[in-house]
Image (cartoon, coloured by chain):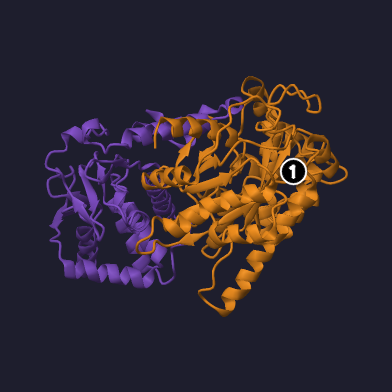
Chain colours: A orange, B purple
Amino acid sequence: MNELVLEKLKVLAESAKYDVSCSSSGTTRKNRPGAIGSAAGWGICHSFTEDGRCVSLLKIMLTNNCMYDCAYCINRRGNDIRRATFTVQELVELTIEFYRRNYIEGLFLSSGVVNNPDYTMERMVRVVKDLRTVHRYNGYIHMKSIPGASPELVGEAGKYADRLSVNIEISKEQNLKLLAPEKDHQSVYRPMFYIQQGVLSSAEERKRFRHAPRFAPAGQSTQMIIGATDESDKDILQLSSALYQRPSMKRVYYSGYIPINTYDTRLPVLKQAPLVRENRLYQADWLMRFYGFRANEIVNETFPNLDLEVDPKLAWALRHPEAFPVDLNKADYAMILRVPGIGVKSAKLIVASRKHGRITSSTLKKIGVVMKRAQYFITCNELSTFTVNEAQPEYVRNVLTEKRSSKRESDNRQLSIIFPD
Amino acid sequence: MFVFRYDKTFEGLLTAVFDAYSRKTFPDTLLSEAEPAPMFMEQEYRVVTETGKSTRVWMALNKKLSREVCGMLMHVWLSELPKSDELLLRYMRKVFDSPHSVTTNFTDDDVVQVEKIARKVSRERMHLIQFVRFIKAADDIFFAPVSPIYNALPLTLHYFTDRFADQKWLIYDIRRRYGYFYDLNTAEEVTLNDDTHLLGGKLDEKLMAQDEKLFQDMWKTYFQALTIKERLNPKLQRQHMPRRFWKFLPEKS
C-alpha cells in the first residue's frame, strides 16, 4: 500500500461514481469463527457525500479502460481521461482495511470491458473469490456482471457475490443502439436470465439440503439512465414493472442523465440533470413496490409522463376523486395506503389502533399523518369535511402546490430520494 | 403530591413499580435520592432496590409484552430524558392494569410517547453503527471515540461483537466517560482512568498504527472523488449525517 494506490483509488472512484446503486441489503450473514465481518440484512449507510448520496459500499472499478464507446459513459474509449487498473491484491487489501475501520459495508465491484466480456468478468471473479476463500471475508459484495458474459462465469460470480447486477441503461433498444452501437438488449437480458436461473435453482436445492450453497442471496438489480433519450415515463415504468415481476429482481435504479460528454451531438443539451423527474420516478417505483399500485395506474396512454409538480400518489388521487373520501374507521389497509399523506407506517398504526377505539383527526396527528395533504381525502368519525369532492381536484392541486412552486424557482436542487411516508 | 425516591437505576425503577403495587399507593413524581422535594409534597417513600423484586416485575412484563415492546422500554430508559422514568411507570401501570394489550393503542399519549422516544434512541443506535470510525492504534487495538446524545452504546454491542469478532476494539463514549473493550471473546465495560487526551475525539498520531494515516487519507480521497459536482446538495448530506458526528469522521476532518 502506497501513494500509487491512493492515486489509482482516486481515478477509479471517479470512474465508478455515476453508478447509482449502493444498497447493501438483502443478505443476513452472521460472523463465523475465523472469518472477517458479517452482513446486516437491512443495509447500512456509512457516510454521505456532498451530493447527499449514501456511501455504503466501496464502489470501485477494477479498471476504467474500456473497449466500448457508449455516448453516456465517462469511461468511453474516446474520452481523454486518466486510466488505471488495480491488481487483485491491492483491491482485496483495500476492501478489508476499510471494512475493519467500519468505513464500508462491503465491496461494489465494477469494471470497464477489456479485450472481451469474459476476460473482464474472469478478472473480477478473481477478486471476489480471493476475498471469500483466501481471506474468509464475510461482508457484503455487489458485483457487476458484464453484458455478454458467459453463463459459467456468471455462475461462478453468483457463488461469491451477494448481489449481481446488469445495467439496462436505456429502456428502448433503438435508443440504446443509437448511443451505444456495440451493445444490445440481448447482451443485458441474457446474464439477467442466468442470474435468475442460478437464484431459483439454489433456492430449490436449499429446500432439500439445508447447507446447499446460496447463489447471489440478495438477488439482482439494474439501472436505467433517464433524460438522455426520448423515452417517456410510461416506457420506463412499464419496463421496471415487468422487471419486478421476475423472481430475483430486487431493485431498479434510475439515474438522471448528467451531461458529461457534452461534445457528443447524439445527446441532448441539458443545463442540469433531470433531478426532479428522477425523484418522481423513484416515488413511482416505491408506489409499485410497497403501495400496491400497478404501473398503468401511475402512467398510461392519457398520462404518459409523471407530473413534476405533485408526487405520483397525489396525482393518482386527484385523477380519481371518486375513490375518496376514505373512511379511516372502516376502510381496509390497501385503500388507506392510497390516501396521500399516509405512508406505510401510519397506515399500519391506523389499522392497529382501530382495535382500541375510533380514529379521530387528533389521533391521526399523533400517529404522524400529514394532515395538510390527507385532510382532503379522508373522513374519520367527525363532521363532514371539505374533501376533494366538494373542493374539486383543481382546487386541491393548487392549494398543495402553491408554496412549493415559488420555492422551486430559487432552489432547484435535488429532492430527497426517500419517499416521504 | 406523593413522591417516590429511588437510585435512578433501571432495577430501582422496577423495584419502585413492585413497591407501588404492594403498597397500593402510586407516586405522582419519581425523584433521585438527592433531588430537592417539591413544594407541595404530602408523603415520601424511599425505594430500596432489590434484585428479587425488579426481576419479578421484569418477568411479568416479559410475560405480558412482546420482546419488541420490552426492548422499547429499555430504549426509553437509555434515552436518559428527564421524566422518562415517570413515563415508563405510567406505561407499565397501564400494561398491568388493562385486561387487553395496550401496546397498539396509539390513541393513548403514553403509548405514543414511548414509541416516539424508543424510535429516537434506536435511530441514535443506528447512527452509531453507521458512523463509528475505528482508528488502528500501534498495539493493534481498534479505537473509536463516540458521543451519542442518548446512551445508545450498550444497544450496539451485539452488532459490533458480531461484525468485528476477529479484532480487538474499544468504543469509548467521551460524553459519558465509559466504553466497551472487546478482547476477542467478550465486550466488557471499561472506564479509563486517564481519558482527557481522548476527549477531543482524536487519537494522537504517535499512538496510531504505521499505515493508519495512509488509510485515512485514502478514505478521504475516495470520499471526495465520489461526489458528483453537478448534484451538490449539502442539506441532504446534513440531514442523513448530522453535523455532530463529523468530528469523528476522517472524511470530514
SS at mark 1 in the image: helix
Question: Which residue is painted at 25% across and 34% down in the image?
Answer: B203
- Mark 1 Cα shell of 10 Å, populated few (<14), some (14-19), many (≥20): many
Q: In this view, does A40 lie to the left or right of B24?
A: right
Question: Which residue is painted at 42% across and 33% down in the image?
Answer: B218
Q: Quadrant of residue A336?
A: bottom right
Question: Which residue is painted at 61% across and 31% down in the image?
Answer: A414
Of the pair B17 and B237, the residue shown nearer to us:
B237
* Residue A117 visible to an observer of this rendering: yes
Q: Where is residue A326 in the image (x, y as percent from the top left)?
A: 69, 54
Query: The N terminus of chain A lies in which quarter of the figure?
Result: top left
Of the pair A252 and A156, the residue shown nearer to us:
A156
Question: Which residue is painted at 35% across and 73% down in the image?
Answer: B63
Of the pair B19 and A226, the residue shown nearer to us:
A226
Name the residue type under label 1: Val
The residue lying furthest to the bottom in this view is A208
Residue bearing mark 1: A388
Q: In which quarter of the image is residue B54?
A: bottom left
Q: Where is residue A125 in the image (x, y as percent from the top left)?
A: 57, 53
